[in-house]
Image: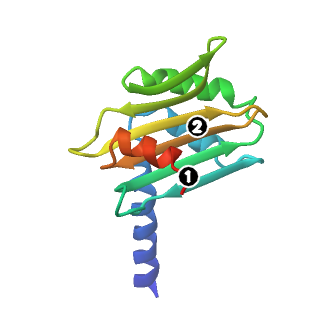
Amino acid sequence: MKKFTHTLLCCLLLLFSTGMYAQKGLQIASVFQKYGNEKGATYVELSKMLSKNWDITHYQSLKLTKAEKALPDIYRCLESDREHARKIKEVVTDGHIQSGYYQLPPVKDKMNRFILFRLGKKGEATLIYIEGEIDSDDLVTLIFSKD
């Protein structure tokens, strides 16, 4: 029984550390940690291969139905992280990012990283982090496909 408990604990630590490593050095990691368990938040994290077609190995998303309290933190983190990123697409209204798709420098060979952000009309906000061998063109296709 001790061996099983020890093995289970090691596996859980490994799984947790995978998510932490994926966002190493990124400010948005604090947004996921701080607001992921808030009331009105939907937090999803997947750390396995999502698709043979898209080669996504890590996916994290946070949707806040009422984002007004979190927006200052989100904008601060986005501003910091996007300094090192390539803008794929960005919409700014009245000096505030309404939506943005950014490609970060890779951590490992062929391991692309992306931050996606969208502020909805009803005050909801969605923040997504994606990591994998998927390239920006395939990511845009995946996001806008109607399948």
Judge from the rendering whether residue 71 lies leftward or rightward of residue 50; answer left or right.
Answer: right
Residue 82's tag is none
Left or right: 124, with 84 as reference point: right
Give coordinates of residue 130: x percent, y percent. Answer: 44, 46
Query: Which x, y percent locates residue 40?
Result: 77, 47
Q: Mark 1 points at which residue?
A: 146
Mark 1 secondary-structure assignment: loop
65 or 22: nearer the eye?
A: 65
Of the residues shown, which amino acid type is indicated by label 2? Val
* Residue found 60% across the figure and 29% down from its top: 74
Q: Where is residue 85 in the image (x, y as percent from the top left)?
A: 38, 26
Residue 55 location, x and y as percent? 34, 56
Q: In terms of image quadrants, where is residue 44?
A: bottom right
| Along the line of sight, the residue nearer the viewer: 132 or 93 | 93
Mark 1–mark 2 CB contact (< 8 Å): no
**Classed neighbour count for the residue bearing mark 1: other residues with Cα under 10 Å, few (<14), some (14–19), many (≥20):** few
Mark 2, residue position: 31
